[in-house]
Amino acid sequence: MPRFTVAGQQFELEQSEIEHCLDGRLPDPVREHYVVVLGRRFPPKQVLACATGLDRADFTTHQARRILKRLGFVAARATEASGRDGVNDASGEGPRAGRQAEALRPYAGQWVALAGPTELLVAADSPQEVLAWLARHERRAPYGMFRVPTSLTEAEGGAPA
Amino acid sequence: MRFDFLELPGEAGRGALVRPVVPVQVEDLEEAPQLCLVDSGSTANRLGAWLAEATGVDLDKAPETTLHVGGVTTIARHARCQLTIAGRRYDAPVSFCDPWPFAFNLLGQEGFLRFFRVTLCAAESWLEVEPEAWS
């Protein structure tokens, strides 16, 4: 098991343990850097703090990124791609040539709050979780919130199967 | 005020599905306007009942009816609340429905189209919403 020293303490960390630790947690707002855990973008410091129990002030974003990359997580800057996890070249119909649809596709069935047409703030299983996240982080979703349909039928006004 | 249609993921290999939606602030829930589908076939505004709870709209003594919407039987509680659309805040009749398993809340005739003039351009995927002069 890989060993790391953070804030003078030694930790043995594994990718699967970190995934387990973050399962069901909502990502905090991503500013500049992120790592992808279970298909979601998390701030590196949130991930390492969760995995080690350390306070986020005990280490830097750079340290967290380096450790998480060594464990096999994808790490990147938020400005490197306009879509989620690099989805930025959709082509198709619609006012945004399909880019908005592609940005929303991974969140089918979830409630989302958007800062802009393709700028996701948070995705969660219930609207109450989305509201709580916005309140906790003092964020606004000027583009709105809704639940991403899971199927064509739902998008056309039908109930979920 | 003009709004682009919302693009939704279609089935794999097919283009996006576009829907005419409008952001609606319910009561003072400024931080999270709800994207609502403009539905000229709906007689009333229909929102998920969770929104009444989240915004403190009292439904205890609200009259209720049973509705069948999109294959779902739901209890609609009828109340008035403050909606803000296209910069106009107004007192609107709303049916708060439970269950409401649909992806979108609906803006219908009585609580929306009566107050706003709506121009739809499906060819260019936008709609314009302007408050009626009298409202």
Image (tube, coloured by chain):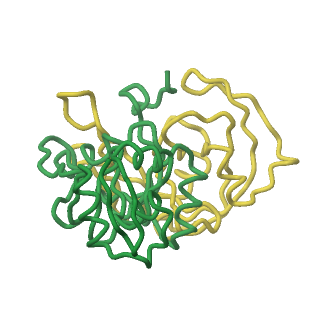
Q: How many numbered marks does the figure carry? A: 0
Looking at the picture, tell me which residue is in the foreground, B27 or A101: A101
Q: In the rendered image of this protein, does residue B76 appear above or below residue A24?
A: above
Looking at the picture, tell me which residue is in the foreground, A79 or B132: A79
Which of the 4 image quadrants contains residue B83? bottom right
User: In the image as oriented, which residue stretches furthest toward the right?
Assistant: B61
Coordinates of residue B120 in the picture (x, y in percent):
33, 48
State left or right for residue A91 relative to residue B16.
left
Which of the 4 image quadrants contains residue A149? top left
Give the residue at x 24% y 44%: A102
- Tell which chain the image draws in yellow: B
- In this structure image, what is the colour of chain A? green
Give the residue at x 27% y 48%: A103
Q: In the rendered image of this protein, does residue A69 appear above or below residue A125?
A: below
Give the residue at x 33% y 46%: A15
Which of the 4 image quadrants contains residue A16? top left
Looking at the picture, tell me which residue is in the foreground, A135 or B43: A135
State left or right for residue A159 relative to residue B82.
left
Give the residue at x 58% y 69%: B89
State left or right for residue B13 relative to residue A5.
left
Coordinates of residue A90 in the picture (x, y in percent):
14, 45
Coordinates of residue B24 in the picture (x, y in percent):
52, 58
User: In the image as oriented, which residue stretches furthest toward the bottom?
Assistant: A57
Coordinates of residue B30 in the picture (x, y in percent):
55, 69
